[in-house]
Amino acid sequence: MIRLVLPAALLATGFALAADIPANERRSGFDFMSSSTQQMQRDDTLNPAMLWVAEGEAQWSEAPAAAAKSCASCHGDAVGSMRGVAARYPAFDERRQKPVDLQQRINLCRETHQQQPALAAESRPLLGLAAYIGLQSRGLPVSPPQDARLQPARSRGAALFNTAMGQLNFSCAQCHNDNWGHRLAGSPIPQAHPTGYPIYRLEWQGMGSLQRRLRNCMTGVRAEPLPYGADELVELELYLNSRAAGMTVETPAVRP
Amino acid sequence: MAALLSSATAQPLVKYVVTGDAIPDSLTGSPGDAARGRAIVTNRQKGLCLLCHTGPFAEERFQGDLAPSLAGAGSRWTEGQLRLRIVDSRRVTPSTIMPSYYRIDGLTRVGAAWRDRPVLSAAEIEDVVAFLKTLRE
């Protein structure tokens, strides 16, 4: 079984790679938002993402086909069985022998345990399930598994984070490590902590995954965005999660 | 095949000579148009300047704060110095975040729509330089 370690231990062993932002200066994207957007996230009755959560909850106990089992029939009540799960994804998958993120993990259950086709990237049912499972980790610390098999992928994610790309030739680190808190036109640059995904983004007028957010940043520097599900995106997610180890899960967050 | 095609369609960049920290000669051989330059500088899809810079543009909301104000740039720098700072700012300050506006080599994963094209054309660079020269304090 995957062993969890305390975030303090992660940092002490230098596990969090080039955590270029000192631990005591790390801040969630929440802190850079206007107070009205913060209020929208704080109050579940105002947070539009709760609609997706409610749909995810309904799906959890529905059999997707007559012969198939529901998620609940294997996993029971998500409030207990899924507590803390989202906080440690991406994690290593035995069958694929590589890291998978939470949405890929959900689709693995769809395919292998429900004999159903994978749900499409960014589809409403996939985001709903991910938001519902994510909610079961809200308030818990981001807890990347200390699993040596993840290390090569996590290092590749760190390397990509520091690689300049696109016509404008920016690395993620140049904005999110070196210039966080400054304004790019009207928007404050956050530190890129993946603590709230999937999020309801006002600009999208809808829900989106971390991969969608990462693809947006790539397009912003006029780079060719990595395709949904690409190993490189999962590697970036892995790195971002280790960089945010110990921060509080906010799913489902609201972002501008 | 793909490589052949892309190299055949890529626009070769105008060659230029750097003297000290400046490109003294116009990339097009003629002076730019300051009014067109102003439009490029304030256009967030084209010049992108106000993503990072502020400047004397009262009508523009949401200017960046990643870089010094452009106000007075025309008194601080010669035309040739301004040209090099737009063409290839990294040549002046290797660690700068200011994009090189007239450079297509040494880039990674450039999006299909932008491949083998500089951010601004030689004529657009000259327009921007002409405009910046008018920003005097």
Image (cartoon, coloured by chain):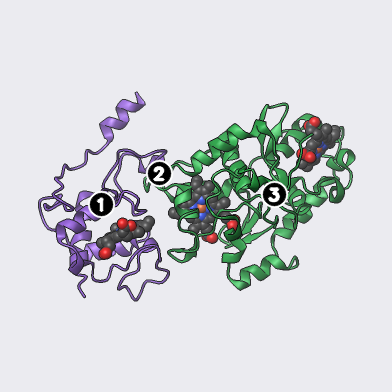
Where the N terminus of chain A falls, by quadrant?
top right
Q: Is residue B74 visible?
A: yes
Q: Secondary structure at mark 2?
A: loop
Within 10 Å of disc 3 (Cα), the crowding (few <14, some 14-19, many 20+) is: many
Closer to the camera: disc 1 or disc 3? 3
State which tag comes first along the sequence, 3 or 2. Answer: 3
Reading the image, the residue beneath label 3 is A7
Closer to the camera: disc 1 or disc 2? 1
Q: Give the farthest residue toward the front.
A: A12
**Residue B127 falls in which quadrant of the image?**
bottom left
Label 2 resides on the chain identified as A
- Total labels drawn: 3
Closer to the camera: disc 3 or disc 2? 3
Indicate the amino acid at tag 1: Val
- Is B77 or A217 nearer to us in this picture? B77
User: How far apart are the two marked residues, 1 and 2, measured between alpha carbons?
Assistant: 21 Å
- Is A64 or B93 nearer to us in this picture? B93
Query: Where is residue A18 drawn, in percent x and y?
Result: 54, 45
Label 1 resides on the chain identified as B
Q: Is residue A65 visible?
A: no
Image chain in purple: B
User: How far apart are the two marked residues, 3 and 2, measured between alpha carbons?
Assistant: 34 Å
Query: Where is residue A231 drawn, in percent x and y?
Result: 58, 34
Indicate the amino acid at tag 3: Pro
Reading the image, the residue beneath label 1 is B92
Label 3 resides on the chain identified as A
Image chain in green: A
